[in-house]
Amino acid sequence: METYDYIIVGAGSAGCVVANRLSENPSVSVCILEAGPVDWNPYIHIPAGFIKTFTDPSVNWLYEMEPSEWTGGRRIAQPRGKTLGGSSSINGNVYSRGRPMDFDGWAQRGNNGWGYADVLPYFRRAENRTGKGDDTFRGREGPLAVTDNTWTHPLCDAFIEAAVQFGMPRNPDYNGAYQEGVTYTQRTIKNGLRMSSAKAFLRPIKNRSNLRIITRAHSTGLILEGKRAVGVKYNKGGANGKPLEVRAGREVVLCGGVINSPQLLQLSGIGSSKLLQSIGIDVTHELAGVGENLRDHYAPRFTVRVKNSDSINERVRGLGLVKEVADWILFRRGVLTLVPTLIYCFWRSNPNIANTDLQMSFTPASYREGVQNQLDEFPGMTMAAWQQCPDSLGYVHARSANPFDKPIIQPNYLKEDNDRRVLLAGMKMARQLLQSKPLEPYYDREIFPGKGVQRDDELLDAAKARGTTTFHPMGTCRMGPDTDPTAVVDDQLRVHGIERLRVADASIMPTMPSANLNASCIMIGEKASDMILGRPAMEPIIIPDANIGGKL
């Protein structure tokens, strides 16, 4: 049986960072287990290839969520990356950190060292920002390329003008001092290629002698000696593969993500005794919060047929697609370098509240039935809106003791009244923006929900019918003090009650950041690595402006 100082389960957004930083020390040995293959799939590296990877079982876990009341009884797909880079290899490449108050809220919940001043140095350490940005907030020397969108479109420019006329400021850097406003999105793309966590953090160091990367290694359980983690069981090659074990001399670090990390804990007997006993798993350690506290962004999308302009829809059909492929191959430019969302708005559902609670996206493309893997046949544009910090809580539960059974995922979208209230305000705002004067020359007609849908109940029915995830699940191994009965890890990311075991991924987030999650996952990996190695935390960056994160 092989033994390493550190075993990392999952080579995703955070896991690749942890592997990089731990193996910087030549005196320690590191092994990282990844259930999926090497990131060889060409669609991974083409930014617009996410349309293909969303449904590709070779690089995607292809999870489905349970039906619920506010999804109209639908099962909604929840893609998760299953390859080196994890979900950073199949996501939409959008880079968004969130508001300072998000992280201050983490600290206020008893998580010392997780306020904005504490996490900002780690965002900066990871980041290689090209483009606009105050260097107080932005990093220029990290491994992760963060670039501006260089592809513009008349529909996008008209939309930005519409947002400005609505009252939103132009914000050149929503990852800087202030998030509020409207702008083109920032991306993890460099020279027309995806910059996944694997490409940024793992590929440059893959040949380190103290690092072992094992792919197609599906972890099936933790090896525990009493209340101490000492290793990991895995199948090399999946369900029909060879059962193997690897031992950890110092620690096991779970970086499997919001679905796989809690499932592995549950399979190992760590979780709610009621759940574990119901599926025939012996209880090793009672920890009721494992798999609970799931949150995700849920968004309906307005689809409008466009006139007097083309859209991305036409550019990727027939000879148009041939031209775009050639443009990408020869020059690494064109629509194949695009992310699914070109414009972001961060705004308020009510003018009387102080901070933004809505995130809205716009793109000069439209998707069949609102699902982002097949474009409409007609020229179209799409706008989505969602509540930044949803209140509704769901869960992830192991379905059985079989580690190859997909878990039960129930997000409970829109269960709480406030989520429906904010979403409804966002839907009305989206329609208002799409029908505004700057977009009037291009606006043909609303395809979905359609002009006949006007009342609040009708709009919510439309959200039920076609709303979907924005692919930001989090919180299932929630960070908090041991006085919090829902907490799974402490503020050092150590699993409560189990020695030598940590979690470092989106599952540890106590509350939802007002953003996409990839940037924060990478920050978590950076911060976790210092904790694991016993390094002093980076010096906090205190921003003197008392209004940081507020209005422009």
Image: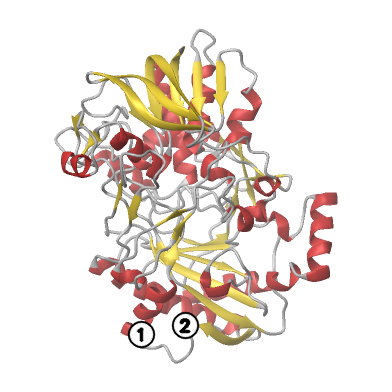
Q: Alpha-carbon distance for marks 1 and 2? A: 9 Å
Q: Residue at x 28, y 41 (%)?
A: 478
Q: Residue at x 60, y 75 (%)?
A: 381
Q: Residue at x 40, y 25 (%)?
A: 233
Percent across and percent down for residue 2 are 48, 13
Kind of residue sitting beneath label 1 = Glu
User: For this rendering, which residue is in front, 134 or 498?
Assistant: 498
Judging from the image, the colouring scheme is: secondary structure
Percent across and percent down for residue 285 are 20, 29
Q: Is residue 171 left or right of residue 321?
A: left
Vertical arrangement, residue 401 with respect to residue 406, above or below: above
Lower position in the chain sequence, tag 1 or tag 2: 2
Q: Is residue 140 visible?
A: no
Instruction: State the residue position of label 2.
Output: 449
Q: Residues within 10 Å of mark 2 (few under 14, many from 20)?
A: many
Residue 458: numbered disc: 1
Q: Residue at x 61, y 13 (%)?
A: 209
Vertical arrangement, residue 521 with respect to residue 95, above or below: above
The outermost residue toward the front is: 240
Q: Is residue 345 left or right of residue 293?
A: right
User: For this rendering, which residue is in front, 378 or 120?
Assistant: 378
Percent across and percent down for residue 413 are 32, 63
Disc 1 and disc 2 in contact, CB within 8 angstroms: yes
Q: Is residue 402 visible?
A: yes
The quadrant holding residue 162 is bottom right
